[in-house]
Image (tube, rainbow, N blue to C red):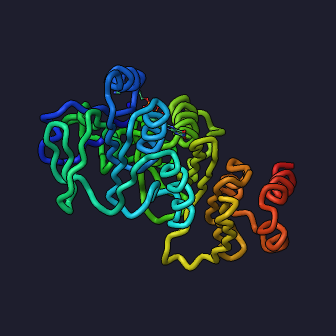
Amino acid sequence: TGASPILPPITGLQNVPFQVLRTMDDALALKSAMTGAKHAMVLGGGLIGTHGAENLADAGLKVTLVEAKGQLLPGYFDGTASALIAKAFRAHGIDLVFGQAVSKIRPGVAVLEGGSEIPFDLLLVATGVSPDLSYLGQSGIKTARGILVDDLQCTSHPNIWAAGDCAESSLFQAEATGVAGILPVAVEQGRIAGQSMAGDGAVKPFPGAVSLNTYTFFGQQAISVGRCADDAGCESHIRHDEAQGTYLRIDLMDGRLMGAAAVNLALDPGILWQLILRRTDLGEVKQRFLADPKSIGRLVMAREWK
Ligand SMILES: Cc1cc2nc3c(=O)[nH]c(=O)nc-3n(C[C@H](O)[C@H](O)[C@H](O)COP(=O)(O)OP(=O)(O)OC[C@H]3O[C@@H](n4cnc5c(N)ncnc54)[C@H](O)[C@@H]3O)c2cc1C
């Protein structure tokens, strides 16, 4: 059953018209709200908020994006990569406000925590999504943030399975469970749930979710695959060319890929995703992989797939 937009507990939000972006109907409602609007306010600098801001600016609106954390796309990119992305937004006239949440909304005005006021005549709320569990009622099915599932996507009820944005499953790179919220994981979990429901003995358990995001902005591109927690002790290899607007970060641990992020460099995110999931030992080719992750990643995977 997917997920629904989270509405932050901002005083006054429910008293003003606002838009969200999850379904086609939401997109059509946003499009019609744009008619006659001049100044859009976007709450949230994640993937939905940044795509929304870019398209609103392309349509000729003045756009202000407010992100409570200190950078754009905080769950996906580090500060350096994010600053390159932010530069493109500013170059296209979008005002970015970081490190302050909107604390109050009055008709046509958003008040930031610091007290400053930003006028708007169109408001897009993009502060994340959350599985909608309300229909489960008193079913007794175990939930946390999402519907808790085992590695065959079965819930706490033996005849009910869950997959995709509503399911909370194991994470590949953490001793924890989580809601992945991305299409490739939803597809994989759906396949496993279907096989498991049909009693297919060949079903392979879900290995845990690894994040995989490709992001395009103003004709540029960025990717983010996997993650390495700040305290995990990964070796981070970084190449940054401010003038060219390029960035590459590769995080390794014990010769194995943990995470990669790139801005304006061609990489194969699917191959990097597989290298993480297979815990492929890159020790032998480490220096060559760091110098050319695209070609060497392809070579290594070609060998693994044989
Ligand atoms: C604007 C946007 C852009 C995105 N871009 C990307 C991207 O580039 N890459 C990526 O990997 N992911 C992206 N995602 C996330 C991706 O769409 C989701 O991870 C994926 O759709 C999850 O699939 P799902 O089947 O779990 O949920 P959904 O696709 O949300 O489908 C759930 C369906 O269940 C229906 N439903 C809900 N409640 C009930 C009920 N009680 N009874 C019956 N039906 C019900 C809903 O109407 C909906 O049609 C994006 C999401 C959004 C909103």
Q: In which quadrant of the rendered view does residue 202 lie?
A: top right
Task: Answer left or right for 299 relative to 56.
Answer: right
- In the image, 75 versus 201, the foreground residue is 75
Residue 151 higher or lower than 297, as above or below: above
Residue 274 higher or lower than 139, as above or below: below
Q: Residue at x 86, y 55 (%)?
A: 299
Q: Position of residue 92 (x, y in %)?
A: 51, 45
- In the image, 259 versus 120, the foreground residue is 120
Q: Residue at x 34, y 21 (%)?
A: 35
Q: Residue at x 79, y 74 (%)?
A: 283
Please say whether residue 172 is visible from this viewpoint: yes
Please say whether residue 146 is visible from this viewpoint: no
Task: Answer left or right for 193 relative to 108.
Answer: right
Q: Position of residue 10 (x, y in %)?
A: 17, 48
Task: Answer with the quadrant where ligand 1 appears in the image.
Answer: top left
Q: Position of residue 55 (x, y in %)?
A: 47, 34
